Each structure stands twice: as structure tokens, then as C-alpha cells.
Image (tube, grey):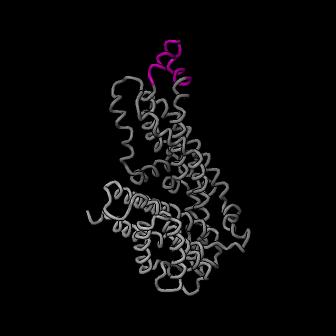
Amino acid sequence: MSMLRQGTVTGALIGLFWAFVIAVTVSVTLSFASGFGFRPGSLGCLILGLGGGMAIIYLRDARLVMSGFILLCIVLMFTPLSPILFQENVPVLWQLLAVVSFGLFMIWPLTLMLVEAHPGPLTRHAFEDAVIRFLTGFGYIVFTAAVLIPFYVMVMTSLKSQQALLKNPLDFSIELSRGWDLFRSYIELFGQFNFGNYLWTSFYVSVLTVLITLLFSVPGAYAVARLRFKGRAAFSRSILLIYMVPMIVLALPIYITFSMTGLRNTIPGLLMIYPVTTIPVALYMLQGYFRGLPGEVEEAGLMDGLSRLQVIWKITLPLSLPAMVSVSLYVFMIAWNEFLLAFMLLDDPSKFTLTRGVAMLNSSEIPRQHLMAGAVIATIPIMALFLGLERFMTKGLTAGSVKG
């Protein structure tokens, strides 16, 4: 361990690992963006990673190191020591972009990682600071890639023509020369596959699910949090027991029951079963918030002559708005993304929800880009809703975590 705490060793090892991380990141990014073949150069990453880490440790001049490092990468671009290797058909401009990007994103973050490192023995704080900064940068890249790459592939595939997909299914570059024809899959989905109706059905089913869930969960959560009755503690602990039973286990009984009662293939049938899956989690979330509200405020309302229902309507609900917004968003996302029950209960295309409509596109007779376009249509609204109201959801989830 004492050997690793030497500034030169720490800088060289972190530089080595970071070089491979950046080389893989740049190669994957440019391969997706251009459609050409890029891959990391092991020998180049080894030499430049070790050298770059030690250069930062000794020179301590970020601009000088970055300028020299990028120039060296450009020189090595035409040799087997290049940190990024290319296929023969890759234009020189793309090659230059690859090695310059590698040099920039190699040295700039590495300078921040090794800000407290120096030649000679490092303190425990300086060593751990360098390691933590490296792991933080590595984590950002990994999680960003895990989120963005599937979404990017989905969007780019939806913009492809059938000929382009057949020619090279792994080419995810965009063909700007096609103009508005890029959106042909989306136009055909709304014009030929009735996706506008699917969007509307999913929207009003999700909104009604939210309203029904709040209608039952608000009084239920308030009763568990405020009222004293026999079995209150057992009821409070057993709220989430329904989630111990997988929905797939209940699928057959639900299908048989709904078929016998005429509720299968109807929107009211969905509105009966969706709240069953959302009310327990809404009860659990709201009761924690209600417990955190000062009881003295409600007692003052009761002393002023308000009934219990008036106290809930005029005092508790306004104070609980952040938690209710959070629960509403969560329930809306559950209902919007639900697939199993919609797939099992709906057979009439005129009544499909959006997820059921997307599943219909998974057929050998329908071009693959239409399936990806449908997935994008299903993803964008809920993503925009979540990103726009995320601060309310975070506030609601943490509300009530500290009592008083």
C-alpha cells in the first residue's frame, strides 16, 4: 500500500486506467455517431496513460500538458501507437476528431483527479482523494452510457430507412440528407397504426388511475396515521403485502374473472385493476408524510369547530401538496408504463393503450424502425413529465422523513 501512495505510481496507474476508459468511450461514441469503425489501441493507451499521469504529477501545468498531449496524440495517429485505431475507410477528419477528443478528455479530468497529488509519498487524504475522483468520473461515464446508449440506438433506428437497416443494422448515424423523410416512421404510426388514439387512451387511463388512487389512498393513509382503531398497526404493516405476490401469478385468475363478468377488453376493466396495484404504494407513501405533519395544527382546527373531513380538506391536504404531487407522478408513471394487464385484457385495437400498441408492432411483418419509433413515442412524454416535475417528486419522497 505504501508503494501505491507514491505520487508517481498513483498518477501513472490512474492515468493508465483513465486512458482505457476514455479510449473506449470515444470509440463507442464516434462509432455510433459516424457509422465508421473505431476501437481502443491497447499499446497506445498503455504508453499515453502512464506518461500522461506522470506528466501531470511532475509538470503541474495543465495547459502545457494538455497541449503537448494532444499534439502527441495527433502524431501517433498515423502509427500503431495511436490510442484510437480506425478502419481503413475512416476519413482523416474523423480520425483527427477521435485523437483530439481522447487527448482533451484524458488530460482535463485527469488534472482534476490528481490535483492534490505530487512527486514523493502522498498522505492518505491525497491518495484517497485521487482514487475517489477517478471512481466518480468512471461512475459518471458508466451510468451515462447505460442510460443514453439504449435510448440513442432506439431513436437512431427509428429514423432509419428500411434499406439502410438492411444494408448495415449497426450503423446508427443520422442521414440528414433525407430531410423530413427521417420522420417517416412516426408519420406512418400516427397515420396508419392509430397511435394518436393509443396516446389519448394511455393518457386518460393514467389520469383516472391517479384520481381513483388518491380518492382511496388519502383517507386510508390519514386514518392509519392519525386515527386510533383496533388493528391499526397490523394494517399499517401489511399495506405492501400485495407486492409480495407477482402480478404474473394473478394474471390467470384476473383473466378468468374479467372474461366471466364481461370486463375483459374494456377500459373500465383496466380502471378497476390498475388502482389495485397503485393504492398500496400510495398509502405507504402518504401515511409517512401525514405522520410527519404537526398534529397540533389539526387539533386547532377541530377546536375551531371544523369537522374531521373539513380538517382534512382545509388543512391536511394543502399541507400535503408536495407528497400528493409525488404520489401522483409515481402512480401516473406506473399506469402509463403498465404492459402485462393491458396485453392480457385488451384485444380490440381501438382500445389499446400505448404499451399494448407498441407490442403490436413487434412483428416480422412490420419494419423494425416502426417498433423503435413507437418506443420513442411511449418514452418521451413520461420522460419529459418526470424531468419537468422531478423536483416536486424528490421533495415529496423526502417529506415526512423527519418527524415534527
Q: Where is residue 98 in the image (x, y as percent from the top left)?
A: 55, 75
Foreground: 172 or 225?
Answer: 172
Corner quadrant of residue 227: top left
- Tell me which secondary structure the magenta stretch mostly adopts: helix
Q: Does the magenta portion include 151?
A: no
- Residue 233: x percent and y percent? 33, 30
Which quadrant holds the C terminus? top left
Tell me residue 176's x, y (percent): 70, 72
Q: Which of 35 and 385 is in front in this view?
A: 35
- Residue at x-position 63% and y-position 78%: 164
On whether residue 310 falls in the magenta region, the answer is yes
Q: Residue at x 49, y 69 (%)?
A: 65
Magenta-tinted stretch: 294-314
Residue 237: quarter of image:
top left
Is residue 302 placed above or below 49 in the rendered structure? above
Q: Quadrant of residue 179?
A: bottom right
Q: Which quadrant, please, contains the N terminus?
A: bottom left
Above or below, 207 against 159 in this view is: above
Residue placed at 52% from the left, 31% from the top? Answer: 320
Q: Residue at x 35, y 68 (%)?
A: 8
Q: Is residue 46 left or right of residue 275?
A: left
